[in-house]
Image (cartoon, grey):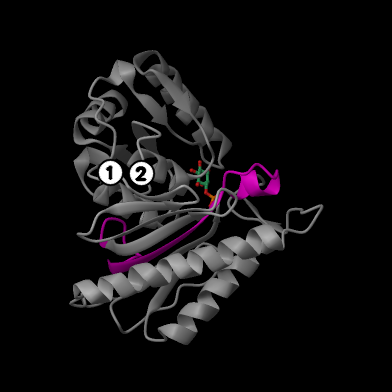
Amino acid sequence: MAAPHEPSLSAADLGTLETMAADLAREAGRLIVDERPSGLGVAATKSSRTDVVTVMDTRSEDLLRERIAARRPDDGILGEEGDSIEGSSGITWVLDPIDGTVNYLYDIPQYAVSVAACVGDTSTPGAWRPVAGAVYHPVLGEMFHARAGSGAFLRAPSGVHALAVSNVTDLDDALLGTGFGYDADKRGRQGELVARVLPRVRDIRRAGSAALDLCAVAAGRLDVYYESGLNPWDLAAGRLVVEEAGGVVVGPGGAAPTDVLVVAGPTALVTRVQQLIE
Ligand code: LIP
């Protein structure tokens, strides 16, 4: 995919993209809750037998793609479950129709729809960035959203809350989130790393959705988070929510986050976690 031109986006343009991301995430979120079939099963597997797809992952992504094609036909799309579409507008929508699919399959209420409008080349690690996005937790009715330069917010049944990352600086006090991949050998290596990290932090949480883990960092529900093996759709919107909540989201050597590594949180803690795991 040729590097799309970078569009000049006004504050109003960014606001429109943010509102659209939230609208789409909410509509798909309602669909996956209201129409979850009883006895939901595995429709297909991808990179391994545990990397599953359900019929609702596909239905959610189809809905998102339909809405984007109708409202912004010149935009590109990079979605977890379908083919990439190259656009001419310079905006690419990065979609995770159900982040936390294994939780969704087991009916564990910790999954989300993640929708982000991005600029740059989303097919090249480190060559793109989100400018507006939303992560919707449909069971809790929590909408995490942000646009570049305007802060991050949680719209919840309890009201609207401005988000700010934790001010914890000491690793010993840090509640850390992480996750594991779908490849058994990789999980073995990730397990060895967790064994090294665990004695150095307050405790570890494995909640099963990178998008919600990143939003938990933005809300101070986690102090710091790291994971390797993530795809652009797992982190696109959540990354912006953390950055707009005053945190940083980095990859190997402190460069842009990629599938090799993502570390997110307040700068001081991120640096200490990087030193520990790299
Ligand atoms: C999941 C991520 C999670 C990771 C899982 C999986 P999915 O995404 O959100 O952080 O640990 O292995 O990649 O597959 O549910 O979209």
Q: Are marks 2 and 1 in contact (CB under 8 Å)?
A: yes
For mark 1, what is the residue?
A: 251
Q: Residue at x 53, y 36 (%)?
A: 207
| Residue 119 is inside the magenta segment | yes
What x and y, as percent, mark residue 91? 31, 75
| Residue 234 is inside the magenta segment | no
Region in magenta? 101-128
> Are there few (<14), some (14-19), or many (20+) residues within 10 Å of tag 1?
many
Could you say which is closer to the camera, residue 249 or residue 259? 249
Numbered circle sitting on residue 137: none
**Looking at the image, is 38 positioned above or below residue 166?**
below
Q: Quadrant of the C terminus?
A: top left
Could you say which is closer to the camera, residue 114 or residue 15? 15
What x and y, as percent, mark residue 47? 58, 51
> Are there few (<14), some (14-19), or many (20+) residues within 10 Å of tag 2?
few
Q: Residue at x 77, y 59 (%)?
A: 37
Count of numbered labels shown in the rendering? 2
Quadrant of residue 273 within the rendered picture: top left
- Tag 2: amino acid: Val
Asked whether, in this view, residue 144 is left or right of residue 44, the answer is: left
Q: Quadrant of the N terminus?
A: bottom left
Could you say which is closer to the camera, residue 207 or residue 30? 30
Asked whether, in this view, residue 120 is left or right of residue 30, the answer is: left
Q: Residue furthest front?
A: 158
Q: Earlier in the sequence, mark 2 or mark 1?
A: 1
Does any portion of residue 46 appear in the rendered image?
yes
Numbered circle sitting on residue 260: 2
- Tag 1: amino acid: Gly
What x and y, as percent, mark residue 270? 25, 33
Q: Residue at x 58, y 35 (%)?
A: 184
